[in-house]
Amino acid sequence: MRFLDLVSLIFYNLSRRKGRVLLTAVGVVIGTSAVVVLVSLAVGLRENATKQLWGINDLTSIEVYPGYNVKSSGGGMMMGGGGEIEDIKYLTPNAIKEFEAIPGVKQVIVEDYFQGNLNVIHGKLHGYSSLMGISLDDLADMGLEANAGTTELVKGTAIVGSWINRNFYDPKARPDDPPLEPPDLMGQTLKFVVSKWSQDGIEIKKTYSIKIVGVLKESRGQADGSIFMRLEDVTAWNEWVRGTRINRNKEGYSNVIVKVESPEQVIDITDQINTLGYMAYTPQATVQGINSFFTILQVIFGGVGAIALLVAAIGIANTMAMAILERTREIGLMKAIGATNKDVMSIFLGEAAGIGFIGGLGGVIFGWGASAILNIVAVSYYASQASEGGGSPLSSVASTPFWLPAFALIFATVIGLISGLYPALRAATLVPVTALKYE
């Protein structure tokens, strides 16, 4: 039997019993739509959970800190916890060379915080912030972008995070004064007043005029509340605060950022750095844990929908079994005029798969529509909650990945095909003479 003739006969047989086919397909619609909605909900929850993680905007970076070996009370060695610090693995220039020698490491960026007191003055306004020295000429190498100005650092300049202008206040403000409007710092020359305390308890101050050459875009991370300057400038200020020169070969740096060529290598390189005795952390580990949890959730949700499809499969098998009883003489007649067992089996398998396909198509459409309605209702609700209690509203609750509708449609069709396997075998093995005599 030619393929086109087979398809034409399948559609003709399905159209003869429209009511029964549609009622059977309803079960498949329910199961398929359940799979689409539940898996879309799990994907949407994962995306929202990832978006709510502050500072996770670069999955190729590893933050490295000095390693501390702590001697336990029993005399053994352990990392972290209470006890006496016996040895410290400093982030010295030699340690940086070790990191750079690891295969897959693209760049090592040194960071160092200002250790004294800092008061930032803009006109009559005073501000506060953490000051960070960075061993980069361009902050774009850290994945940061400028909202205004540049990301390039030169001597005597600074680049500020997106939140810095919110940290200013008027020390002479009165209680009835209107709220302070955050100043525009771009291009302004600010006074950086650094101070320290002498052994006699006298405060010693120095004032520097620093030009702001760039304001960063919001990154939802540490950079938003930081001021960046060249590492050499901050090191000089730290040496003034301490009153001695800093020996990096002995004291090292406060922390470094290891940039990796590919996110797939991050976890492995983090483990290698920890093995060397340092403390390394990567946002990739957090994201990986979240993805693992929600992958399990997707499987569970998909399994719940698959149970509904299993019930629908029983309905398809029952419909096809009834069709064989009603069409026994028809089967005998087809075999009598030359139809083979393969032809008969193909017809009934095609009809079962057709029911699964029709139900799957309806389920995909219905599931997509239900996900859209769920998004509208949930987003409206959470938007009202956010406006009342603060917080950021959700952009969506359910997110349908591009592969899910195709997978659900194919899965429903395969379920229909498997459900019709036993009835098709029964129809194919009927003896023509016996079938023709069937009343």
Image: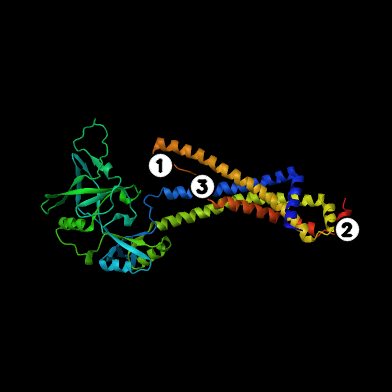
Residue 280 in the image: x percent, y percent? 35, 61
- Between 424 and 297, the residue placed more toward the observer is 424
Query: Quadrant of the rendered structure where residue 240 is?
Result: bottom left
3D distance between C-alphas at marks 1 and 3: 18 Å
| Quadrant of the image occupied by residue 366 | top right
Looking at the image, residue 266 sits to the left or right of residue 320; the answer is left
Of circles 1 and 3, the one toward us is: 3
Residue 45: image x %, image y %? Answer: 48, 48
Earlier-in-chain disc, 1 versus 2: 1
Looking at the image, is mark 1 or mark 2 nearer the viewer?
A: 2
Tag 1: residue type?
Ser
Q: Which residue is mark 3?
A: 399
- The residue sitting at the top extreme is 176
- Which numbered marker is on residue 141? none
Q: Is residue 75 at least partly visible in the picture?
A: no
The amino acid pointed to by label 3 is Ser
What amino acid type is highlighted by mark number 2? Val
Gap between marks 2 and 3 measured at Cα: 56 Å
Report the residue marked by disc 1: 392
Give the structural element (helix, strand or loop) at label 2: helix
Between marks 1 and 2, how big is the CA–CA gap? 74 Å
Specify few, some or many for label 3: CA neighbours under 10 Å numbering under 14, 14-19, or 20 or more. Answer: many
- In the image, is 400 to the left or to the right of 117? right
